[in-house]
Amino acid sequence: MRIKMFLTLAALITLTGESAMTSNLQKAKDAFDHLDKNHLNIVEEFYDKDAVFQDPIHQIKGTSAIRAYYANLYKNAEAIRFEYKNTSEVDNFVTLEWRMYLKSPSLNSGREITVDGVSLITFGGKDGKVIAHRDYFDMGEFIYSHVPILSTIINVIKSKMSGD
């Protein structure tokens, strides 16, 4: 009886501790797993008001600019999801290696595309939110190769560069 009570109490303490102290890595995964055109409020919950976001074509500052970026990115997305590969968390720094699956009528004739990338995220400030977020990915893989005219040009350039 005492052992059963002890195990129940230990399980309760473990669950309570885990829910009270969500890691920054888990916060990042949760944010990107739920962020879409219908859940843009996540931006203000996740990012510090003065956060800096950067990707291969943007460098923006502040939650209103970041929210506008995601609104534009996701406005035509029918579906988006992430698969995480190598991830790490050291102090306030999170690294996520990811594969994004995106379905949009304006890309790849509406068929799902995949894009591999890495996010470097720094948490801090007085509220412990994201203060810096930088994404690394291949814009050709993401956009250029899925737009009909651009994909033809890119394929010709790739062919010439590879010596074919």
Image: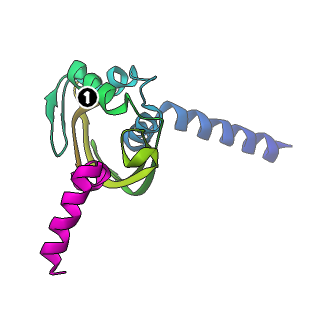
Q: Is residue 126 visible?
A: no
Q: Residues within 10 Å of mark 1 (few under 14, many from 20)?
A: some
| Residue drawn where x is 54% and y is 36% of the image | 17
Rendered-image quadrant of the N terminus: top right
The image shows residue 22, relative to residue 156, as above or below, that is above
103 falls in the magenta region: no
User: Please, what secondary structure does the residue beneath circle 1 have?
Assistant: helix
Could you tell whether 142 is left or right of 79 in the image? left
What amino acid type is highlighted by mark number 1? Tyr
Magenta-highlighted residues: 139-164
Residue situated in front as seen by the camera: 47 or 18: 47
Q: Which residue in the protein does label 1 denote?
A: 69
Q: Is residue 160 magenta?
A: yes
- The residue that appears at 24% across and 51% down in the rendered structure is 149
In percent of width and height, residue 45 lies at: 37, 22
Q: How many marks?
A: 1
Q: Is residue 127 above or below residue 32?
A: above
Q: Is residue 129 left or right of residue 56?
A: right
| Depth order, front residue of 139/10 | 139
Q: Point out residue 70 in the picture as x, y percentages from the top left corner.
A: 31, 29
Give coordinates of residue 155: x percent, y percent: 23, 64
Q: Nearer the viewer, residue 155 or 52?
A: 155
User: Would you say the magenta stretch is mainly helix, strand or loop?
Assistant: helix
